[in-house]
Amino acid sequence: MHHKLHQMHQGMDSDRERERTVFVTVGTTSFDSLVKAVDSTQCKEALVSKGYTNLLIQLGRGTYFPTKSSGEDGGLKVEYFTFSLNIAGFLQSAALVISHAGSGSIFETLLVNRPLIVVVNEALMDNHQSELAEELAERKFLYCACPETLAKTIECMDLESLLPYPPSNPMPVVQSLNQFLGFLDD
């Protein structure tokens, strides 16, 4: 009996391993250029070549709708929605997260230890968000791209080279990020 249960569990695991979902989130805003980039043939082919099977896109207030696909032709299975109360659940089950540069989305993804590509919205004027993403990319916690470089970033990324966040001693990182963001310690 125990053996059968173990086999069943293994079967479920292998199904889950075969399904590797890329979760894309734009937060509560609209970021059509990110959704268009992810929806491009180049991007989808790059994801398939890296072994991903599903693409789930959270569109926020966006007006561009990607092409849904069943994935039966060997391509990605593509689905999308606008908003959800359970972003955390999607983050946890994702094999890769592609996110806008909102600090909430960035840290929520890093804290559940998911590989992350942050895509910076260059259309935003006061873009302190891109500075945070670039700083974290420099520290090897995530990859940073813009919509035009996303496909190339996927093609070239080596997730093994990313460091876990928070590191074993997060204080130096927290202090330097605080300094960097202009929060001065007393």
Image: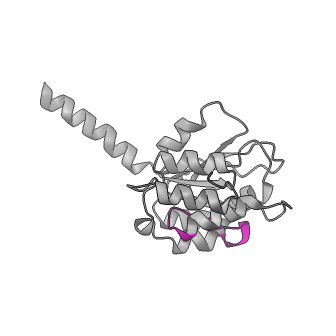
**Residue 137 on image: x %, y %:** 57, 67
> Is 115 on the left or on the right of 184, as rendered?
left
- Who is closer to the viewer here, 21 or 76? 21
- Who is closer to the viewer here, 51 or 32? 32
Q: Quadrant of the N terminus?
A: top left
> Is 21 on the left or on the right of 81, as rendered?
left
Q: In the image, which residues are magenta?
A: 138-149
Residue 77 to residue 3: above or below: below
Where residue 143 sits, quadrant-wise, is: bottom right
**Residue 69 on image: x %, y %:** 63, 49
- Who is closer to the viewer here, 183 or 68? 183
Label total for image: 0
**Residue 177 on image: x %, y %:** 60, 59
> Is 158 on the left or on the right of 120, as rendered?
left
- Decide if residue 75 is in sight here: no
> Is 1 on the left or on the right of 108, as rendered?
left
- Who is closer to the viewer here, 174 or 114? 174
Residue at 46% in and 54% down: 170
Residue at 20% in and 29% down: 5
**Residue 52 on image: x %, y %:** 49, 57
- Decide if residue 152 is in sight here: yes
Residue at 17% in and 30% down: 4
Residue 185 to residue 122: above or below: above
